[in-house]
């Protein structure tokens, strides 16, 4: 009788609270103030895998505790290919390869995939932190330093002027105790929209970039024994420059964000193509003759971030 009564009580008893990760007793690492601020997780939350999902994901794979949803594309190719971009993992496979083999290849490539996903996420985070807020007083990377945008409605829009001001030296600053910070005054009203400010700043930067690029082309062309014919600006997302056999040079105007030595490397790189139209050892010897530290500067061009516009 008692057993039947106990089962009845158990049947109508309230449901237990979700299991939580218990906090250890005092004297443990969780007494640290920052760790105590962490929210209490349910056991299900703690055991749930991290997730990375491509917007066009059609398949999933669990890779070392990370649930990866990837976009699968079939095409005329001989091997299975992998690429990781801002949206996530994409897998390209021949039409005849069965899904089981594709899944197995994803597992075999898991270390590389997770590494690239992490690198992409970190780069995206850094890109977001470098995003410019287009307003009065905005800071814009310029020639390896910074330039402040100030709105001055008293100026005509065609009379934009760059001025230099001096501010107290910071760590690693020049020994003269001051840092030169450029100020770009834009002839815009203080209530100008973010788009107006961005467009005005970009127009000035592009004009300045073209003038500087022409100066550097004229400086290095005689040293390389070549003659360039025409310069045009590009805004390509990943390509910094190109050269044609007819002497036409294209340079990305966003190079103006980098310091002069990096700009010079790209200029010499493209001018060198007027002598050697490939990337053979002879080409790199040509670049090295003018820019001995080109490898370091090339690395800076890859590692440093340019702001989103």
Image (spheres, helix red, strand yellow):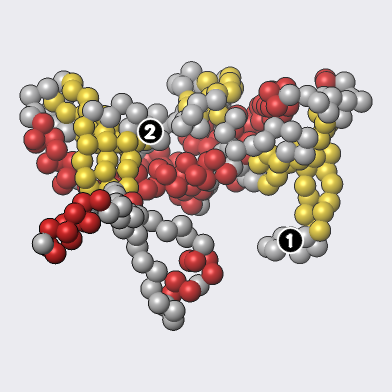
Tell me if residue 159 can be seen.
Answer: no
From the viewer's perspective, is 219 left or right of 123? right
Total numbered labels = 2
Location of residue 221 (image quadrant): top right
- Point out the residue furthest to the front here: 1
Residue 194 in the image: state x and y as whole percent. Answer: 70, 27
Asked if 266 appears above or below 15 in the picture, the reply is: above
Q: Which residue is mark 1?
A: 170
- Point out the residue furthest to the bottom here: 27
Q: Which residue is mark 2?
A: 87
Q: Quadrant of the N terminus?
A: bottom left
Residue 303 in the image: state x and y as whole percent. Answer: 48, 47
- Nearest the viewer among 121 and 269 is 121
Location of residue 164 (image quadrant): top right
Residue 141 in the image: state x and y as whole percent. Answer: 66, 41
Q: Residues within 10 Å of mark 2 (few under 14, many from 20)?
A: some
- Nearest the viewer among 120 and 269 is 120
**Going 13% across and 25% down the picture, which residue do you hit?**
94
């Amino acid at each position: 009788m008692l057993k039947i009564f106990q089962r009845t009580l158990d049947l109508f008893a309230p449901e237990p609270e979700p299991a939580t990760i218990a906090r250890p007793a005092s004297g443990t690492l969780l007494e640290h103030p920052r760790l105590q601020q962490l929210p209490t997780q349910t056991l299900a939350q703690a055991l749930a895998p991290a997730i990375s999902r491509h917007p066009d994901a059609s398949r999933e794979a669990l890779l070392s505790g990370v649930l990866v949803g990837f976009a699968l594309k079939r095409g005329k190719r001989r091997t299975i290919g992998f690429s990781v971009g801002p949206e996530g993992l994409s897998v390209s496979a021949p039409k005849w390869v069965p899904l089981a083999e594709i899944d197995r290849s994803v597992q075999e490539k898991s270390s590389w995939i997770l590494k690239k996903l992490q690198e992409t996420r970190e780069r995206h985070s850094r890109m977001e932190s470098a995003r410019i807020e287009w307003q009065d007083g905005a800071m814009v990377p310029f020639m390896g330093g910074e330039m402040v945008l100030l709105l001055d409605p008293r100026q005509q829009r065609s009379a934009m002027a760059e001025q230099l001001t001096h501010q107290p030296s910071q760590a690693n600053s020049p020994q003269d105790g001051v840092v030169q910070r450029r100020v770009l005054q834009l002839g815009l009203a203080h209530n100008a929209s973010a788009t107006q400010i961005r467009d005005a700043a970009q127009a000035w930067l592009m004009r300045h970039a073209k003038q500087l690029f022409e100066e550097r082309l004229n400086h290095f062309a005689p040293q390389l024994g070549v003659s360039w014919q025409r310069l045009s600006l590009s805004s390509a997302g990943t390509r910094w420059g190109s050269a044609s056999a007819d002497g036409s040079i294209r340079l990305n105007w966003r190079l103006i964000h980098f310091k002069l030595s990096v700009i010079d490397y790209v200029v010499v790189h493209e001018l060198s193509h007027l002598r050697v139209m490939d990337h053979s050892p002879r080409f790199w010897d040509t670049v090295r003759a003018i820019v001995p530290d080109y490898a370091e500067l090339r690395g800076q061009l890859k590692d440093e971030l340019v702001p989103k516009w």
